[in-house]
Amino acid sequence: MASDADTVFDLVVLGGGSGGYAAALRAAQLGMNVALIEKDKLGGTCLHRGCIPTKALLHAGEVADQARESASFGIKATFEGIDMPAVHAYKDGVVSRLYKGLQGLVASRKITQIEGEGRLVSPTAVQVNGQRVEGRHVLLATGSVPKSLPGLRIDGDRVICSDQALQLDYVPRSVVILGGGVIGVEFASIWRSFGAEVTIIEALPRLVPAEDENSSKLLERAFRRRGVKFEVGARFSGVEYTENGVRVSLENGKQFEADLLLVAVGRAPVSEGLGYEEVGVAMDRGYVKVDGYCQTNVPTISAVGDLIPTPQLAHVGFGEGILVAERLAGLKVTPIDYDGVPRVTYSDPEVASVGLTEAAAKEKYGAENITSFRYNLGGNGKSQILKTTGEVKVIQLKDGPVVGVHMVGARMGELTAEAQLIYNWEALPSEVAQLIHPHPTQSEALGEAHLALAGKPLHVHD
Ligand SMILES: Cc1cc2nc3c(=O)[nH]c(=O)nc-3n(C[C@H](O)[C@H](O)[C@H](O)COP(=O)(O)OP(=O)(O)OC[C@H]3O[C@@H](n4cnc5c(N)ncnc54)[C@H](O)[C@@H]3O)c2cc1C
């Protein structure tokens, strides 16, 4: 749908990813006249190159592992291999169904969709397809793209980023992954399940370095058992092409040969050449600077999602988009507590958390004021049934509320739904201990940890 040149929209949204489309949907729901400008596909990174396709591949990997391990459940099945075109057909089917649903949803809210590459040309206007789209407010939501290291060129063939990794039509025999954060660890898990030899290189001293140290330790232990190799505290120094692949060198002198190098060292905001600075929007290293209400220094311009320096997560984009729409509609809004946003790395095992790490809690409140309990999934019936290992760790302010929950194990991501309520409602362990968890579920592990912190452990050995 094209916009009428004389229309002044209530809100012009630049970028139709998680942050942009959430704002558009909520603003339209609140009665605003909204234009949504997208140069590629509605749904952005999360739907087409991020959350959804990676989780489909991870699930396919889980099915492969279950087939391999079926005999240990008494089931006679044989694992014959990975049919990559069929895996992609499954993954693409999931994406296209969600894409259709999203297109229908946006259309049903009477949002004016404009296809094309937009550029901010004034505090209230975006230029697209040679046309000026005016709004009382503009929301910048142009997201992010994979970044690389200085001098490291992503050729899309042997040196790839996550965009190409999602399209790979074969299972590599071996891969080196640069970066042991969320994206690197998820691809390591996928490729290992598909049968590849995987080595992760991480410059910091541990995998998933943003997580609680105990979670890193548990993930590393599980990865060792799965045969995922990793070098931590190791800095990349260069890559050269070999006859059939790549040779990756580290500053410590070690070298690794593989079919592919996946560069997963983070994502850079998309802001260059889009007119932001020219219009006077304050920036910091490519990110748009905002206050707690996602408003920039230019009062008519807001920004959300991966473009601003908040956690690069789809649900953060959704939350920020909703916040902006509600603020512009005059509703009372509260700044987001980013510590209270759940974080999940969907590898096998999953690493899930909300709130502060133990180190951050000790720094904030003083080590003497923090206590914690680790419940081993070995005592949890459902986890035993699933044959998963790991822990639920709960960090508490002494005689006070829970300030962090950190979980490692299969399906732990699902438990962040409860963990986030506990953290964000500042629940006391004694209050959570009052709640009866369904048996046998993995949620009982959360319940057990709180029972223990409340001084009445149940399934815990002394
Ligand atoms: C491999 C991978 C896995 C991930 N997994 C998860 C996960 O499991 N859970 C999670 O929460 N997050 C995950 N993420 C992160 C998540 O995808 C992002 O945080 C989220 O997509 C950010 O939303 P956004 O709206 O800010 O940006 P984007 O989704 O990047 O959307 C920005 C949109 O703006 C458009 N655009 C850019 N410039 C212009 C322009 N000039 N004119 C018009 N349109 C423009 C782009 O085409 C794009 O569609 C993952 C990311 C990756 C890469």
Image (tube, rainbow, N blue to C red):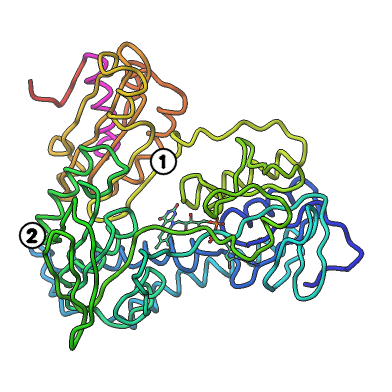
- Residue visible at 32% across and 66% down in the picture: 263
Tell me where the magenta segment starts and ends, as one range: 438-455
Residue marked by disc 1: 342
Q: Sequence-wise, which precedes: disc 2 or disc 1? A: 2
Residue marked by disc 2: 72
Pick the residue in front: 277 or 39: 277
Q: Position of residue 62 (x, y in %)?
A: 24, 63
Q: Quadrant of residue 391?
A: top left
**Height in image: 85 above or below 369?**
below
Q: Position of residue 348 (x, y in %)?
A: 23, 55
Give the foreground label among 2 and 1.
1
Q: Is residue 446 magenta?
A: yes
- SS at mark 2 in the image: helix
Q: Position of residue 92 (x, y in %)?
A: 44, 75
Pick the residue in front: 213 or 430: 213
Q: Is residue 62 magenta?
A: no
As drawn, the label of residue 280 is: none
Q: Magenta stretch: dominant SS?
A: helix
Q: Quadrant of the N terminus?
A: bottom right
Q: Quadrant of residue 170?
A: bottom left
Are the residues flagged by discs 2 and 1 in contact, CB closer than 8 Å? no
- Residue visible at 32% across and 51% down in the picture: 345
- Residue visible at 37% across and 22% down in the picture: 364
Amino acid type of the residue tagged 1 in the rendering:
Pro
